[in-house]
Image (spheres, rainbow, N blue to C red):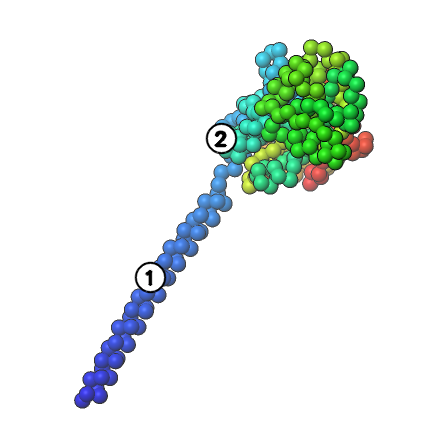
Amino acid sequence: MKKKSSLWLVSLLLVFVLALVGCTKDEEAGTEKTDDSTTDTTATDTASATSVMETVLSRGKLVAGINDALPGFGYVGTDGKNAGFDIDFAKAIAAGVLGDAEAVEYRPLSAQERFTAVQTGEVDVLVRNTTWTTNRDSEVGLNFAPVTFYDGQGIMVPADSGINSLEDLEGTRIGVETGTTTELNLADQMRARGINFEAVVFDSADAVVAAYEAGSIDAWTTDKSGLVSRQSIMADPAAHKILSETISKEPLAPAVKGGDDKWFDAVTWIVFATIQAEEFGITSENVDDFLDDENPDIKRLLGTEGNLGEQLGLPADFGYQVIKQVGNYGEIYDRHLGPDTVFKLDRGLNDLYTNGGLLYAAPFR
């Protein structure tokens, strides 16, 4: 009898333990299911995150971060409107996405402000003399479209200073703008040559130039295009010269926030459209004559054949609109920097690869 009672008690305890374990497993399974559900929802939310493309289309205008104080590239004209080489690329993006080159709101940004403005979504695209570097591509989190201007850093000095080379800058005070690549480039090159100098840092390009013209610094440095631009509006341009040495590579390109492939692709191929159009000899004046061209590459560029626009989330004729409303790369360059401007900048590296330059569009196919 005692033995039967003991067996009954053990059996009862066993049933209780099994029930408890089963309950615990059900709860754990429920927790795991809840976690999976949450993960799935998060993944869905991430996948369906709104692209800047949708924002621009919904808003009906492009918000572009620019420089409004760099003649030739980005400035305010006598008519009060923004103009320049970079401004035209902002217009090209608006023409390609919205079909209207004038549908742009310009946000002037300093060198210190520009990256934050892209990261926070204050601007849709940065089109402002910005160098493509490893750090900006990775840690800063930008994606750079094709290079629109191949530049290099130079140094300006008074024409009568007796300074003709980097070595002649021994013991001088050289002005640089904070938040740019120029300070590090200058330090690297001068250290490599064993040249002692004092870097004087300013918050803006205007402050650097003002100090230079006042004589409180002996020289100043930035991209050569910037030196040429600023020299053109100095009180006596002939009183200054730019040293022949180029101390860095400065590929300048439009930039967007990383992680939005749809918007990045659109901006990339709009820039390529201006380059490819020049290679084909298609301009804002003759583009209509090419609408019936039988060349399949031209047909795809202008959107009369294929579905490249649809693949990019752009109108079928985005290439045509860019060229018709803004022009090809050569037109944009000559309009603001070419032989008929005060800058008279030679195309050099910024010419088509067929002319010995570096400009090359990926295939439209």
- Point out residue 30 in the picture as x, y percentages from the top left corner: 35, 59
Assess disc 1: are there few (<14), some (14-19) or many (≥20) residues with their C-alpha within 10 Å of its C-alpha: few
Task: Inspect this view and state whether residue 361 appears.
Answer: yes
User: Which one is in front, 179 or 15?
Assistant: 179
Decide: is 86 above or below 143: above
Q: Give the labeled residue for mark 1.
A: 27
Q: Separation of disc 1 and disc 2 at Cα?
A: 46 Å
Mark number for residue 130? none
- Point out residue 294 in the picture as x, y percentages from the top left corner: 74, 34
Q: Residue at x 48, y 44 (%)?
A: 46
Q: Residue at x 70, y 21 (%)?
A: 219
Q: Earlier in the sequence, mark 1 or mark 2?
A: 1
Question: Element at badge 1?
Answer: helix
Assess disc 2: are there few (<14), some (14-19) or many (≥20) residues with their C-alpha within 10 Å of its C-alpha: few
Side (left or right) of 127 relative to 296: left
Amino acid type indicated by mark 1 = Glu
Mark number for residue 58? 2
